[in-house]
Amino acid sequence: MTKILVTGAGGQLGSQLLGRGDSAGFDLVGLTSAELDITDAEAVGDAVEPGAVVLNCAAYTAVDAAESDEQTAHRVNVDGARNLARACARRGARLIHVSTDYVFAGDASVPYEPDAPTGPRTAYGRTKLAGERVVLEDDPSAVVVRTAWVYTGAGSDFVATMLRLQRERDTVDVVDDQIGSPTYAGDLAAGLLELAGREDVPGGVLHATNSGQASWFELARAVFSGVGADAARVHACSSAQFPRPAPRPAYSVLSPAAWAAAGLTPLRPWRVALEAALAGLPPVCD
Ligand SMILES: NC(=O)c1ccc[n+]([C@@H]2O[C@H](COP(=O)([O-])OP(=O)(O)OC[C@H]3O[C@@H](n4cnc5c(N)ncnc54)[C@H](OP(=O)(O)O)[C@@H]3O)[C@@H](O)[C@H]2O)c1
């Protein structure tokens, strides 16, 4: 049975992966940031076993905070990623490294292919792009999987926030000028496990999101409808009304073509995935 080591196992994606390991027939071991700090090269070297697959979900993901603390983001997203790539190359383990749409400028009008020119506009995006590069330099057999707009519907992600605001407020203003592909973390986890089992996929960059596209406003309306609330309570507004330290990409749609060409199962349409995600959440008692 192939062993899979999940780093950053306490995070949104890491925890979804751990919940799916048994059914996928892998021996899945998750290490949280407290159990394995990926910036500790020696600890990383000790944790990576020959023949294993390492699924790196550990990252500095505080997009706004990174603007004033790029050094910390760099330490995790670049130095940490390098530690994993070097350990995997040295030990004959296979690295799957998760990255982001923020490596792009977000000014396109057609879906980004993996080899499209990058141009991050944020500190977070710069560190994630640098992380991709060190991973592929130090371990050319590694697969970098970029994703976007990930949610579980629990915790404090966008879908969870909309579910909370639906209960707390009469109306909600949500930006309508940022377009992306909402991605259920459970579907992404299943896709990553499929990739983990496919040793024939060569090193390089792939994109994985639920298919289709939406604005945050459209996603918010779909969340309201999905729980039987009146979607008209969600009002559209522009990004200019919600200035943030890190500018958000206007267009973040990632093309699934390379993923499908590698023989991997395309992730389902985002509305279908959202419905499934909402159905899987515990009922809310008002
Ligand atoms: N969420 C999205 O919308 C989205 C979109 C595109 C790409 N991604 C990418 O998807 C991946 C997973 O993100 P996520 O959504 O699961 O984020 P997340 O919930 O913030 O999880 C990241 C995890 O990394 C851990 N971590 C931070 N520094 C670490 C270190 N030095 N060593 C080990 N672990 C460390 C964090 O632990 P602590 O909490 O203890 O610090 C956390 O558990 C990341 O590569 C991210 O860039 C996410």
Image: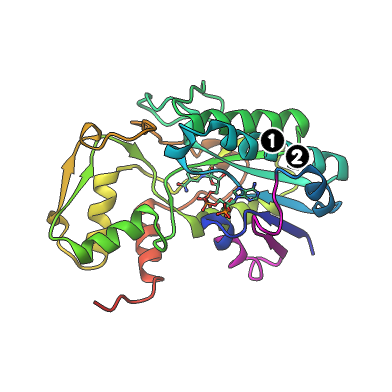
Percent from the top left, x then y, of residue 260? 56, 42
* Quarter of the rendering containing residue 271: bottom left
Q: Is residue 41 above or below residue 7?
A: above
Name the quadrant of the N terminus: bottom right
Question: Chief secondary structure of the magenta span?
Answer: loop
- View extreme (bottom): residue: 285
Q: Circle 2 sits on which residue?
A: 83
Point out the stretch of residues depicted in magenta.
Answer: 16-38
**Residue drawn at (40%, 34%), measured in percent from left and top?**
252
**At label 1, which amino acid type do we have?**
Asp
Q: Is residue 261 above or below residue 37?
A: above
- Would you say residue 32 sits in the magenta stretch? yes
Considering every residue shown, the one lying at the far front of the view is: 68
Tag 2 and tag 1, C-beta contact below 8 Å: yes
Choose between 105 and 261: the one closer to the eye: 105
Label 2 sits on a secondary structure element that is: helix
46 sits left or right of 40 in the view:
right
- Rendered location of residue 217, percent (x, y): 24, 46
Q: Of helix, strand and loop, which one carries label 1?
A: helix
- Residue in the foreground of this view, choosing between 168 and 118: 168
Q: Which mark is residue 279?
A: none
